[in-house]
Amino acid sequence: MRFDLRNTPISKRSIDTTELSIAFFVFLSFCIQFFTHIIGSNVLLILILLLTGLMIFFLNFHKTNIYFFLSFLWLAALVAVTLSYFQTGLYISKYMDLFVFFAGILLIQFAGDNSDSFNLSRKVIIFFSFFYAVSIWVQVLAPSVYLHFANLLPESNRLEVVKWGQTGAYFTGFSSNPAFTAGHLVCGIFLLVAESIQKPKFKIQLNRVFPFAFLLLSLFLTGKRSHMLFLLVAVLSMYILPHKGRAFFIKIRNTIFILVFLLLLFLVFRKQLMTIPLFSRIIQSIADFLEGTDISSGRLPLYRHAWGLFKENPWFGIGWGNFRETTIGAVTLKTKMETHNIYLQLLAETGIVGFSFIVTPMLIMFYTTIRRIRQCVRYEKIGSWIALMYYSLAYQVFFLLYGVTGNGVYDPNFLMMYLFSAAITMSYMRYLQQESLIVFSGLSKAKLYRNRESTV
């Protein structure tokens, strides 16, 4: 539904329900822990996710008249996830992933074809990225103030957060997990970089340098190595992948120079960097690797266990969310854990069949995003879509790589932002198709007019 208020003295623009529904979805992704750790109600979160999906559908389905094969692949993925739940016990927390998929895939289908519909969600991303960045500095500089937030967390989380902060290992800010905080910061960094890209050239605007530096320094304090590594790869992908041929290899050459320069800086200032949690962990990991010590933070036994479960149930797996129920006694003593590798966990829980239905649209979406951005660069179709498409590319790269060491599909905030990124690409595809239909319609009318003139 779109309420047109242009002829009233109250508003100069219409209320875009697509824009509101997209922004609410993004807003919810940044507030997941408010429901799971502060309110402590997974039921309420599931209900809100359900209502969000229904809102996206009922407000926007009548405005969407263009569908692609990829649209149906995402619906097939939703069916595959749903069927996998038939092997799952009645644990309400496990069903959260299903409703995230439900709302996110509906967003992919009904995100419209207008870049302006993403304007509000961009503001939401920037606001919350800085909100979580500031919260880290509150924890660092005003620990007594930060304790007021920590006291809202469950006891086990509160003790961990306080311990991490006191030892300087991780700073979580207004979150219960440094990985979640780092994920929120990554979103803001990607958007700042994407919005700094002008014309088909990669150019950083000076007015974005300081916000970017603030978010990046805050990310260092989370101590998350994988986030930093995959962030770097994703930003470099924004620089390299949109190009082909000679330009592509020039970007590769430049990237090598950049990486060598960063490595030299790291080696020169490694002692000073040891005071920053992220770099102290990297340096320690390098030392452990050289000594032959496991640097996977205990992930290798989880990987072996997941692979063993997959071999026992190769076609349909053991059911969504059931992996963590098998870890006690097999891998851990008393803690339930995810695999920290979405690909192995999907194989173990959904088998070859489910894995194929879920991962295939992810890979096709990634390939499609690269193709569409290359068209933008080639034909200099730069407008407001280019920043959105660069953001979509960067987050997809980050998410697919983070899936090797993290639980992106099983952590709602990561999965929701991934589905939001996929929705950007689908929306742009609908925009291009709509433009083609308009051009085709105009040419057809012109041809008909000429035919009539010739007849007369």
Image: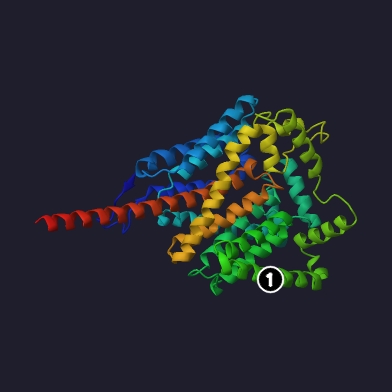
What amino acid is found at the position of numbered circle 1 in the picture? Answer: Ile
- Report helix, strand or loop for mark 1: helix
Looking at the picture, does residue 196 appear above or below residue 427?
below
Quarter containing the C terminus: bottom left
x, y percent for residue 453: 13, 58
Q: Is residue 374 left or right of residue 448?
A: right
Tell me which corner region of the image, top left, top right, bottom left or bottom right, holds residue 186: bottom right
Residues 411 and 51: in front is 411
Residues 30 and 195: in front is 195
x, y percent for residue 176: 69, 47
Residue at 52 percent of width and 52 percent of height: 368
Q: Residue furthest left?
A: 456
Total tally of numbered discs in the picture: 1
Residue 123 in view (yes/no):
no
Badge 1 density bin: few <14, some 14–19, many ≥20, Cα 10 Å: few
Residue at 75 percent of width and 60 percent of height: 278
Residues 162 and 456: in front is 456
Quarter containing the N terminus: top left
Residue 233 in view (yes/no):
yes
Colouring chosen for the image of the structure: rainbow
Residue at 79 percent of width and 38 percent of height: 304
Q: Is residue 408 left or right of residue 311?
A: left
Q: Residue furthest front?
A: 455
Residues 366 and 283: in front is 366
Q: For mark 1, what is the residue?
A: 258
x, y percent for residue 342: 67, 42
Tell me which corner region of the image, top left, top right, bottom left or bottom right, holds residue 283: bottom right
Tell me which corner region of the image, top left, top right, bottom left or bottom right, holds residue 338: top right
Looking at the picture, does residue 409 appear above or below residue 348?
below
